[in-house]
Image: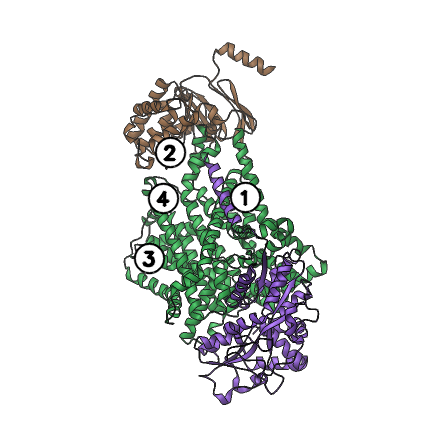
Amino acid sequence: MYAFWKKGFIQSTMEREPVIQFRNCTKLFDSKTILRNISLEVNEENSFTSILGKSGSGKTTLLRLIAGLEKLNEGSIHIKGKIVSEGSKIIVPPHERNVGFIFQDLALWPHFTVYQNIEFGLKQKKIAGYKSIIMQTMNEFGITDLKDNFTHQLSGGQQQLVALARSMVLQPEILLMDEPLANLDVKLKTQMRKLIKQLVKEKKVSIFYVTHDHKEAMEMSDKMIVVNEGAITYYGTPEQSIYFDSTFLKEFIEV
Amino acid sequence: MKPIRYFLLLSSVIAFLLTSCTTTNNEVVVYTSVDQVFSEPVLKEFEKRTGIKVKTVFDTEETKSTGVLNRLIAERNNPQSDVFWSGDPMRADVLKQRGITEAYRSPAASGISEVFIDNDYNWIGFSSRARVLLINTNLVKPQDIPSSILDLTNEKYKGKFTVANPLFGTTSFHIAAIFAALGDEKATQFMEDLKKNGVVISSSNGDVKKKVATGEVQMGLTDTDDANEAVKEGAPVKAIFLDQNGFGNLIVPNTVSLIKNSQNSENGKKLIDFLLSVETEKMLAESCAQMPLHKGVPVPSTVPSLDNIVPMKVNYAEVAQKSEQIKEYLKQWARQ
Amino acid sequence: MGKTINIKTILLLVAGLFSAAIVLPLGALLFGTISGQASEVVNNITSIFHGDVLQSIGNSLIISTAVSILSVLLGCCFAFLFSKANLPFSKALRLLLLLPFLLPSYVICVAWNDVWLFADVHRNLIYSLPAVVFILTTIYTPLAAFIIQAGLKNINAGMEEAGMMITSYKEVFIKIVLPLLRPALFSSFILIFILSLSEFAVPSFLSVPVFVTEIFTQFSAFYNYSLAATQSLILTAICLLLLFPERKFLTNEYFFPFGKKAFRFRMYELRNKSVPLVLAMLYLFFTVLVPVAFLAFQTFSVAKTSLLDIVIMLLPSLKDSLLIAVAGAFIVTLFGFIFSWLTAQYKLKFLQTILLFVFAVPAIVTGVSLIFFYNTPSLSFIYSSILIILIAFSTRFLFIAVKIISDNLRQIPVSYTEAAKMMGARSFYIFRKISLPLLGEALFTSFFIILIFCLNELSTVIMVYPPGTSLLPVTIFTRTANAPQHIVSGMSLVALMFTLVILLCMLFGKKVLFNQQWRESR
């Protein structure tokens, strides 16, 4: 009854459902607490949210929870108002969440060509006429020429593009990225950032972007989530973070 | 779907293998400890004459017959074999003691002397080998050839002769026969003297043959078939029958037994009759110089005959039991 | 979703049935041993404290320890020389090194005995514990080299290079490469320890009393099954004790980089190639070529021998053996894969522990337990058919297959399957499209290695083969007794060539099948 009322309330006051909502979420690994009783609402659609934190702070876990690759221990997660995980249950499996994931190691399948990598997901969704969709996507990302190459034959930047194309071809509402740019040189990084920003605008996708590079976060984000020792210490715009009173945050940003 | 295809492939492989060895009704299963080279032609001949398919599990004395004998014992509650063809009476008696064989008075045994037949007809002996002293003629002068097994305790043979591990095979039967002939006390003394005289213990009779043939040792106790092989190979060896003026030389017959509650016992009996026949004895005389127990079987000149050697007069069933009793002692003895 | 669960359930069920087929016989034997009369059980257990038995256990432990240490040391040298240093002819030498492992141990033992006699070595030196250690070391060194080589191949050049910036390669090798190799060194040590502990032919031929020959004697001269079974359980317990650390520390190691662009393999430039080359060739000459050449010499010294005649004589067994071994290798690899996959999916570590236990049981005991369990009227259809041999193969080798396959399975990054999962692929589809192709080479290798093992398996098979089947190792072994020397040597040579042909098929097949572009620049 309460839930029903609350749902109605949210709908009426905010018009739209929040993109992502964490309610009292706790995540343990082997009885070690990774995330402690987290609650968070991200409301803006088609925005760029970075998740910032030291290594081991739980930021990747946060991402994997959204994706549905990890189960919660307590609490619930909602995507666009729909409950996707609750307690230790996965209610909506990863592939039905309409979420894309770019892994830290990109996870491009080594035994498939670029084309086959991109084709894989479309085949699963049984989308008619997927061939033209692939060609179109490859054009957009400028990787048509690499079509028949195996992924390890590509440069780092090209691999990024393929990974992006592979996820974007499925038109996800949310794209999760786990430090994908970590291994690129400065120039490539700048290029890729530009491209990602452009994506947000054109493709209408909300991006959650895990990084430990606060400059990157400050520069790209609409909103910033800072995670420290299993808790969210800051959620807001990058600009405001400077005025936020937290020793940890200050230390982290200044280093 | 591909996995289904894999599964079909797998099951067809198994099905193929299964059908390739399905049983026909007219068959007989025989387990034998007699070497395949010699036993297979005899069994093939039976197959040819009767049209009964023979399925064999071969073994060899080199493996101490673990395979066959232990299989027969382990299979006791659900026998797979119909007939056991043994190279010596001892193993057949082990099976009898454990109630694995049953009596069968084969009509073909009528020409065979009582001493080679179990009192209860659980096994019947046929074609015999003899235990011999194989000597290397390059290393042993004629005047130095021992005439009795007891001579081996003589100082001049110290460290120059070998026997196979007495826990196994015909060697074990041989030692048991000596215990039966000399009595426990004297026999034990003899064994201890052998040990003091540096006897070399080989892994098998085949190994004894090899050691003598290559000159690794001067002489050794083995079976006539091994000796015969060495001669055929052209090794400088000679087989000596011992104690011809004393208690005689040990004769070791093959034996055949019918397995209790077997599946094809009628065919089994036919096979036993065939094995005990004059033809089989003739074949074995020709292929591996075994002495026929029937009288008047024509044999090649190289095959010794029971007419011109003095056999050790023992009750084979008693010796077989004796060998069970002295095993613990022999185990200690064999440890160098 | 529903369908996915079905396939998983079916697989679990099949794997469960299959492990029951393997484990139940041994379990029944164990139960039979400890559920006997109390006094008998106590007697059986205290039997190991008799002087003789203790001495044989001592011998066993000395031999196994010495053999495993020596084999691992030598194997380490060869692995380094043949795969990491730019030694000329290393491919041919590597193949040569493998020979003793491909021949049945009794054949090698006989060959060595003849060589020593020929060289007029004193008897007391031949029939001794050091001689057993020597022969077993030549047999197991290739195995160690094989495992360590795989470990070396997985060390990223970066790790060595980082060290080389600071110190000499010698230091780097000791301080960096060797510690990184620790899992491979440890695995090969344990594996060789277990194999040499249950080795029967060599010590019994050279009359060195060891625990296995003691058990064998109880079994084959005294027909005392309960004592033999109790003693083999003690032997198994010793093996398991050793394996415990392996399970505890090694299975969770995650040290292989896989298909990553950053992975490079560093070759070591030998400054002086000739000294190690000569040393390696000398070793191979004395431990490999001499016994094999002696076999050849014995075969052909008799003018009338024709290898073709021997092949014709062995042809029926060659055919049967190959057919059954192929079926065995197929099933063992298939189930090795299913078990590895289930282990990885459901974290069923105990599955592997069970297989390990089964693997550590001496071959003879496995044979007896199979007879006791399967030779009943209701299971006769298994016992009197080829199925019993396939079960015997599985009991003996499934662990090895699971080890090869699951080590490779663990090298596939989780993200590869997760990425596919995100796109809605069913687990079975992921398995078929992602895991299976990436595992292809491992499955292929496992198939052939198990094939070679199956072709040479003697100890268990001789106990259970159905009447009327002829198998190569059984035929050779049973014919060895009375056949003349040149025929015996000839048969061993034929068996060796047969195995070599299969090995070459494997190497060739690997080249053809797994030569796709995506592997090449890895």
Position in image of residue C95 (x %, y %): 36, 57
Can you name the residue that lies furthest to the bottom here? Answer: B143
> Residue at position x 52%, y 41% from top?
C343
Q: Amino acid at mark 3?
A: Ala
Q: Secondary structure at mark 3?
A: helix
Pair 2/3: label in front: 3
- In terms of depth relative to the viewer, which is nearer, B242 or B202? B242
Q: Amino acid at mark 1?
A: Lys
State whether discs 2 and 3 lie on one chain. Answer: no
Name the residue tied to disc 3: C92
Circle nearer the N terminus (3, 4): 3
What is the three-letter code of the residue carrying label 2? Leu
Q: Is residue A203 above or below residue C110?
A: above
Q: Which residue is mark 1?
A: C349
4 and 2 marks on the same chain: no
**Mark closer to the chain start, 4 or 1:** 1
Q: CA distance from mark 3 to mark 1?
A: 39 Å
